[in-house]
Image (cartoon, rainbow, N blue to C red):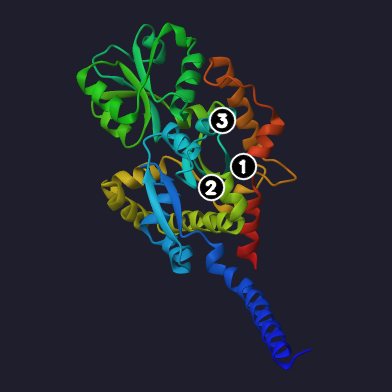
C-alpha cells in the first residue's frame, strides 16, 4: 500500500475516534440536572387566604423553586371551572379549586391528579339572604332566586341545605353566577339569596342574613374542601417536584399554625384585605398539615385510601343524580385519581 494512502487512512481513523469520543462526552452534558427541570412552574390560584397564599406571600415558593433556578408564575382564577379549562389547554401545571370541580375534572377526563387537601371549609362559605326579603329560614327560599357558581363547593352545599330543609332545587330558581357576578346581581336586587365564599361573602353579609354555612353542613355529614390538582404530564415528568410543591404548601400550614397573625398579615397584603379580615377567613376553615394528609381521615396512603375517597365518591354520586356530571364514576377511578404518593414521598423527605 502506498505510504500516502496509509497516512490518509490513519488520519481518517483518528478523526473518527475523536468524533466518537466527542459524541460520548456530549451525552452527560445534555443530561444535567438543570435541563431535567422545567424553566417555569405555572400555578393556578384562587383569592382566598389559605396555605398556598401564605406560601406565596412569605416566599416559600422562592425557597423551594426559584433558588433552584425554576421560576414560578401565579395565575388567578375566579372558579374551578376556569382552572379546569386551563388544564385542558395545558396552560397550567397546578391549580386549587373546590373538590366538586375535581369531581367534574375526573368525570370529563381532564388530565389531572388530586394531590392535596388545602382546607376543610367552614364559616368562609355560607348561604346568605337579602335583608328585607322576608327570608328567615331556608324554607322561606321557596320560589326565590338563588345564585351560586355551579359545580362548586357552594353549589353542592346549597343543594344539600335545600334538601335538608325539605326543598327540592325545582322549587327555587337557581342561577349560575361567578363571584363577581353575584355581587353585581345582589347590588341590583336581581337575586334574593346566594351561597358563596370569601371575600364575596363578607360583601353580602353587610346587607344580608346568614341562613347556614359550610361548618354547620359539615356537622351534618357534608364535608367540603378545597383541593390541589396537578397536570398529569407535569407529574409524570417531574414527580420529585410535585413532592417539593407539597412541602411548600406544608410550610404555609406550619407558618399559620405557629404565627396566625403574621400569616394573616402577609396574605392580607396580597389579597387587599385587612389583617383582621384575613385572619377571620382563615379561622373559618380547618387546615390539613402534610402528616395528616396521608392519614385515614383524609387522603390516606396508596395501599389504604382515606375517608376523603368516600366523600369524593358520595359527592360524585350526588352530582350525577343532579345532572351536574354525565358520567357515573367508580371507586376504582376515584382511587386512581386521588394520588397520595407525592405526599407520602414528601413526608419521607421531612423524616430524612
Residue contact at pointers 2 and 1, CB within 8 angstroms? yes
Gap in Å between the C-alphas at discs 2 and 1?
A: 9 Å
Residue at the image point whose x is 56% and y is 50% from the top: 234
The span from disc 1 to disc 3 (Cα, nearest Å) is: 16 Å
- 183 relative position to 110: left or right: left
Q: Residues within 10 Å of mark 3 (few under 14, many from 20)?
A: many
Horizontal and vertical percent for residue 221? 57, 27
Give the alpha-carbon distance from disc 2 to disc 3, as whole Å.
20 Å
Do the numbered discs 1 and 3 sit on residues whose CB atoms are within 8 Å? no
> Which residue is identified by label 1?
298
- Percent of width and height locating residue 292: 60, 49
- Image quadrant holding the C terminus, namely bottom right
The mark closer to the camera, 2 or 3, is 3
Mark nearest the camera among 1 and 3 is 3
Image point 26% across, 32% down: which residue? 203
Which mark is drawn over residue 288? Answer: 2
Q: Which residue is mark 3?
A: 103
Amino acid at each position: 500500500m502506498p505510504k500516502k494512502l496509509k497516512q490518509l487512512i490513519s488520519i481518517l481513523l483518528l478523526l473518527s475516534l475523536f468524533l466518537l469520543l466527542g459524541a460520548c462526552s456530549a451525552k452527560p452534558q445534555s443530561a444535567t440536572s438543570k435541563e431535567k427541570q422545567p424553566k417555569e412552574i405555572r400555578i393556578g390560584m384562587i383569592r382566598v387566604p389559605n396555605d398556598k397564599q401564605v406560601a406565596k406571600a412569605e416566599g416559600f415558593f422562592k425557597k423551594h423553586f426559584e433558588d433552584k433556578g425554576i421560576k414560578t408564575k401565579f395565575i388567578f382564577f375566579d372558579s374551578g371551572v376556569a382552572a379546569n379549562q386551563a388544564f385542558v389547554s395545558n396552560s397550567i401545571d397546578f391549580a386549587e379549586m373546590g373538590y366538586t370541580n375535581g369531581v367534574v375534572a375526573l368525570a370529563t377526563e381532564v388530565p389531572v391528579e388530586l394531590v392535596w387537601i388545602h382546607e376543610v371549609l367552614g364559616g368562609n362559605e355560607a348561604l346568605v339572604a337579602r335583608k328585607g326579603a322576608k327570608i328567615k329560614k331556608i324554607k322561606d327560599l321557596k320560589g326565590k332566586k338563588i345564585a351560586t357558581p355551579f359545580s362548586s363547593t357552594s353549589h353542592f352545599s346549597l343543594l344539600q341545605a335545600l334538601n335538608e330543609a325539605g326543598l327540592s332545587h325545582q322549587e327555587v330558581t337557581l342561577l349560575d353566577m361567578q363571584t363577581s357576578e353575584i355581587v353585581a346581581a345582589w347590588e341590583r336586587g336581581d337575586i334574593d339569596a346566594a351561597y358563596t365564599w370569601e371575600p364575596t361573602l363578607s360583601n353580602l353579609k353587610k346587607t344580608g342574613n346568614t341562613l347556614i354555612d359550610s361548618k354547620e353542613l359539615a356537622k351534618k355529614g357534608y364535608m367540603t374542601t378545597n383541593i390541589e390538582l396537578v397536570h398529569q404530564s407535569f407529574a409524570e415528568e417531574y414527580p420529585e417536584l410535585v413532592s417539593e410543591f407539597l412541602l411548600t404548601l406544608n410550610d404555609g400550614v406550619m407558618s399559620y399554625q405557629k404565627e396566625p397573625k403574621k400569616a394573616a398579615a402577609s396574605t392580607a397584603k396580597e389579597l387587599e384585605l385587612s389583617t383582621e379580615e384575613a385572619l377571620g377567613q382563615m379561622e373559618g376553615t380547618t387546615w390539613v398539615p402534610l402528616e395528616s394528609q396521608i392519614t385515614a381521615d383524609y387522603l390516606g396512603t396508596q395501599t389504604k385510601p382515606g375517608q376523603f375517597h368516600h366523600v369524593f365518591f358520595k359527592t360524585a354520586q350526588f352530582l350525577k343524580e343532579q345532572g351536574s356530571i354525565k358520567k357515573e364514576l367508580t371507586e376504582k377511578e376515584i382511587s386512581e385519581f386521588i394520588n397520595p404518593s407525592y405526599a407520602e414521598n414528601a413526608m419521607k423527605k421531612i423524616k430524612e
